[in-house]
Amino acid sequence: MTARTIFKRIIDREIPAQIVHEDDLCLAFVDVSPQAPTHVLLIPKKEIASLDQVADEDAALMGHLIVTIRKLAAQLKLEDGYRVVANCGPHAGQSVDHLHFHILGGRPLAWPPG
Ligand code: 5GP
């Protein structure tokens, strides 16, 4: 059995987080180390380790996450634009093995990333 991640512990309310959205399928909360004025993480409640582990049966869940990103962007007033990032695996610097989308905004964001 794999260890419970820090994000699972946030879902289970064992660790506090500044939650900005919750529904049956997902949770969004402020990143503890924000890299922009707005930096929110959106995670599925289902324990999926990374984008690499998304199954065919997760297609509807993934669609729900994308629609939720659009709603969160409006809620967070990111009308000037925002970036969505999902780090997958060691070369991308993924540090928590629970699928998460970073939603970053509130300032111009440089491109390309490092
Ligand atoms: P990754 O590097 O895996 O793409 O992103 C993990 C993110 O989770 C990082 O931006 C990090 O700041 C954030 N993070 C790690 N631990 C916690 C925590 O306990 N609470 C919150 N709110 N964010 C966390």
Image: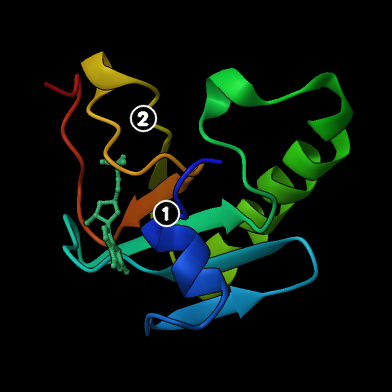
Relative horizontal placement of residue 105, taking residue 12 as reference (left or right) = left
Amino acid type for the residue under numbered disc 1: Thr
How crowded is the residue under tag 2: few (<14 C-alpha within 10 Å), some, or many (20+)?
some
How crowded is the residue under tag 1: few (<14 C-alpha within 10 Å), some, or many (20+)?
some
Determine contact: label 1, label 2, CB under 8 Å.
no
Q: Residue at x 88, y 28 (%)?
A: 57
Residue sitting at the far top: 91
* Rendered image quadrant of residue 86: top left
**Quadrant of the rendering where the N terminus is positioned:** top right
Question: Which is nearer the eye, 27 or 15?
Answer: 15
Q: Residue at x 66, y 58 (%)?
A: 45
Amino acid type for the residue under numbered disc 2: Asn
**Quadrant of the rendering where the C terminus is positioned:** top left
For label 1, the residue is 5
For label 2, the residue is 87
Colour mode of the rendering? rainbow
State whether label 2 is within 8 Å of ligand 1.
Answer: yes
Q: Can you give x and y, in whole percent of width and height, for residue 92 in the image?
A: 27, 21
Q: Can you give x and y, in whole percent of width and height, for residue 76 in the image?
A: 47, 72
Q: Can you give x and y, in whole percent of width and height, for residue 31 in the image?
A: 29, 64
Going from the N terminus, do you reach mark 1 or mark 2 first?
A: 1
User: In the picture shown, does residue 82 fall above or below 110?
Assistant: below
C-alpha span from label 1 to label 2: 16 Å
Q: Residue 89: which numbered mark, if any?
A: none
Label 1: state its secondary structure: loop
Residue 79 visible from this viewpoint: no
Task: Select label 1 or label 2 by which is in front.
Answer: 1
State whether label 1 is within 8 Å of ligand 1.
Answer: no
Q: Residue at x 78, y 49 (%)?
A: 64
Relative horizontal placement of residue 100, taking residue 6 as reference (left or right) = right
Residue 17 visible from this viewpoint: yes
